Image: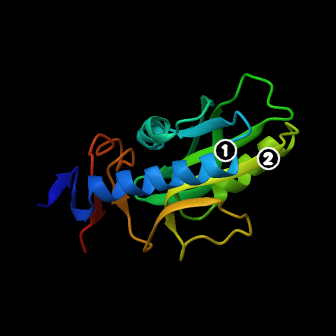
Amino acid sequence: MDIQLHDKVFTPFISAQEIDFAISEMAKQVEDDFAEETPIFIGVLNGAFMVVSDFMKHYKLPCEVSFIKMASYEGTTSTNEVKQLIGINQNLEGRTVIIIEDIVDTGNTIEELKELFKKQNVKHFKIATLFLKQDAYKKNIKLDYVGIRIPDKFIVGFGLDYDGLGRNLSEVYQLKD
């Protein structure tokens, strides 16, 4: 069933079951890759809060979690400018850092994060994203864990919003043409 947020109509796109399966698979891959370490997962707010929460439920090994707040969207379009709003307080030198994103499209936020963490002398810097708009992604930065590849269409739900609305939806909806 379609939903309306502000002035736009969205149609169902990805079910809660598909999302849960993708997140559980990503968690298993990270466990396999870093079973001997205690990684720190860093969620990118606001969008990734639901992804991080579910990822943590699936990740069964010792780990830490923190958040960073970045902003690059206004309405339905990327501003192509990333602003760091809230940073990380702890020392990350020699640590395995795994960024957890809700969605990667242009890659501008990922590029900014890579620069920020390069200065921190981390042991490993990895990127996990629930959604990847591969047609929009133009950077040469490897995305280590990708849950679901999607077309370059605007989506809401499961942490993603349209001007503040829709983050609480357990499924993902796409902008209706």
Left or right of 13, for residue 92 = right
Name the image quarter holding the N terminus: bottom left
Image spot of residue 119 (x, y percent):
87, 40
Task: Indicate the secondary structure of the residue bearing disc 2.
Answer: strand
Residue type beneath disc 2: His
Q: Residues within 10 Å of mark 1 (few under 14, many from 20)?
A: many
Q: Residue at x 33, y 54 (%)?
A: 156
Can you say whether 80 is above or below 62 in the image?
below
Q: Camera-side residue: 7 or 1?
A: 1
Left or right of 173, for residue 54 = right
Can you say whether 117 is above or below 15 in the image?
above
Q: Residue at x 38, y 55 (%)?
A: 21
Residue indicated by mark 2: 124
Res. 126 mark: none
Name the image quarter holding the C terminus: bottom left
Query: Cβ–Cβ below 8 Å for labels 2 and 1?
Result: yes
Can you say whether 93 is above or below 171 in the image?
above
Image spot of residue 124 (x, y percent):
79, 46
Answer with the quarter of the image where residue 138 lies. Answer: bottom right
Residue farthest toward the left in the current orientation of the protein: 1
Image spot of residue 127 (x, y percent):
65, 53
Q: Residue at x 42, y 74 (%)?
A: 151
Q: Residue at x 43, y 57 (%)?
A: 22
Q: How is the image coloured?
A: rainbow
Left or right of 120, for residue 133 = left
User: Real-space Cα distance between discs 2 and 1?
Assistant: 8 Å
Q: Residues within 10 Å of mark 2 (few under 14, many from 20)?
A: some
Task: Indicate the secondary structure of the residue bearing disc 1.
Answer: strand
Image spot of residue 66 (x, y percent):
61, 29
Residue type beneath disc 1: Ile
Residue 72 visible (yes or no): no
Residue indicated by mark 1: 98
